[in-house]
Image (cartoon, rainbow, N blue to C red):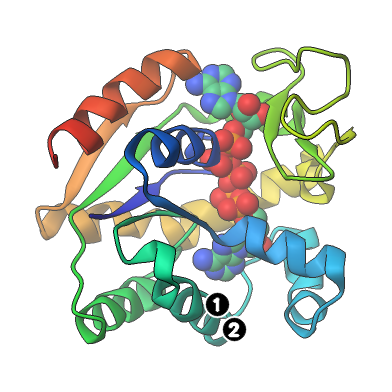
């Protein structure tokens, strides 16, 4: 089972992908997290991607194509994967079609998490992530058990560089211009499923679990 999670920055793609991958034993392919880790570790990929990520711009397609191909060829992605943050424009969507074909795989569904723009700024600017394992929290909606400490690994919680309000606004513009057209692209192919993301994390999860895991089991 290969599923794309589509939605604007802050829609809850990462949060839901984490929960669904655990519940359904699927690989969580989180392109943004792969890039942030590469930036932390100062690898060649990290050095190439850093400026784009920090400004909220898309990293060039040819760099992302290599990242996604390597990730989808990994052993854990063969049983199925949730693609979080890819594709993000039409070129990437066409690349994904060709790549899955080459790997003998297919796309089962594209789940669009719909959240009003007014809620997205609050979600992104209040987000905190673990500096150790990358787990996602929120200062109002998803608190850790101990202040500023990750429940999972005990790491310190920090704010993402690109979660400052000005950068979040730019990411929303980039989304509207480049990623928005993918809603129609996948709708026309009969793959699009819509979920109301303006509910609590657990409510969204219950809907997704039925839609994604139970309908494909
Ligand atoms: P990426 O990390 O993928 O960022 P994004 O797509 O902008 O998505 P976010 O991580 O901001 O949001 P999300 O939908 O995952 O929400 P989350 O679950 O965290 O990409 C970062 C950058 O990398 C890009 O800007 C770009 O530069 C580059 N990049 C990545 N992929 C690329 C690609 N394919 N091509 C080119 N460049 C690429 O939730 C947000 C917050 O809200 C959290 O605090 C969470 O706790 C909270 N929350 C979640 N759900 C709810 C809810 N239902 N109610 C209340 N709060 C909630």
In this image, 29 relative to 121: left or right?
left
Q: Which mark is residue 67?
A: 1
Q: Quick check: 146 left or right of 134?
A: right
Q: Position of residue 155 (x, y in %)?
A: 86, 36
At x 32% / y 59%, what residue is drawn?
182
Position of 142 compared to 76: left or right?
Answer: right
Estimate the x, y position of residue 75 in percent, counting from the top left. Answer: 41, 70
Classify 10 Å Cα crowding around label 1: few (below 14), some (14-19), many (20 and above): some
Q: Quadrant of the C terminus?
A: top left
Give percent across and percent down for residue 172.
59, 47
Q: Quadrant of the N terminus?
A: bottom left
Identify the mark at residue 175; answer none if there is no mark: none
Mark 2 neighbour class, 10 Å CA radius: few under 14, some 14 to 19, many 20 or more = few
Which quadrant of the structure image shows residue 207? top left
> Which is in the foreground here, disc 2 or disc 1?
1
Ligand 1 within 8 A of label 2's CB? yes
């Amino acid at each position: 089972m290969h599923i794309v999670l589509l939605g604007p920055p802050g829609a809850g793609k990462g949060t839901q992908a984490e929960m669904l991958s655990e519940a359904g034993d699927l690989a969580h392919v989180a392109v943004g997290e792969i890039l942030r880790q590469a930036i932390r570790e100062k690898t060649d990929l990290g050095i190439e991607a850093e400026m784009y990520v920090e400004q909220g711009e898309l990293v060039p397609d040819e760099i992302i194509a290599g990242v996604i191909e390597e990730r989808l060829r990994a052993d854990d992605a063969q049983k199925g994967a949730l693609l979080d943050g890819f594709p993000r424009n039409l070129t990437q969507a066409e690349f994904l079609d060709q790549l899955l074909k080459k790997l003998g795989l297919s796309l089962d569904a594209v789940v669009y998490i719909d959240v009003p723009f007014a809620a997205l700024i609050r979600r992104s600017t209040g987000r905190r992530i673990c500096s150790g394992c990358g787990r996602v929290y929120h200062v109002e909606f998803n608190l850790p058990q101990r202040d500023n400490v990750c429940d999972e690994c005990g790491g310190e919680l920090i704010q993402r560089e690109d979660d400052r309000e000005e950068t979040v606004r730019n990411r929303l513009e980039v989304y509207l211009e480049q990623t928005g057209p993918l809603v129609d692209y996948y709708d026309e192919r009969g793959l699009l499923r819509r979920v109301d993301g303006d509910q609590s994390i657990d409510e969204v999860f219950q809907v997704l679990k039925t839609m994604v895991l139970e309908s494909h089991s």
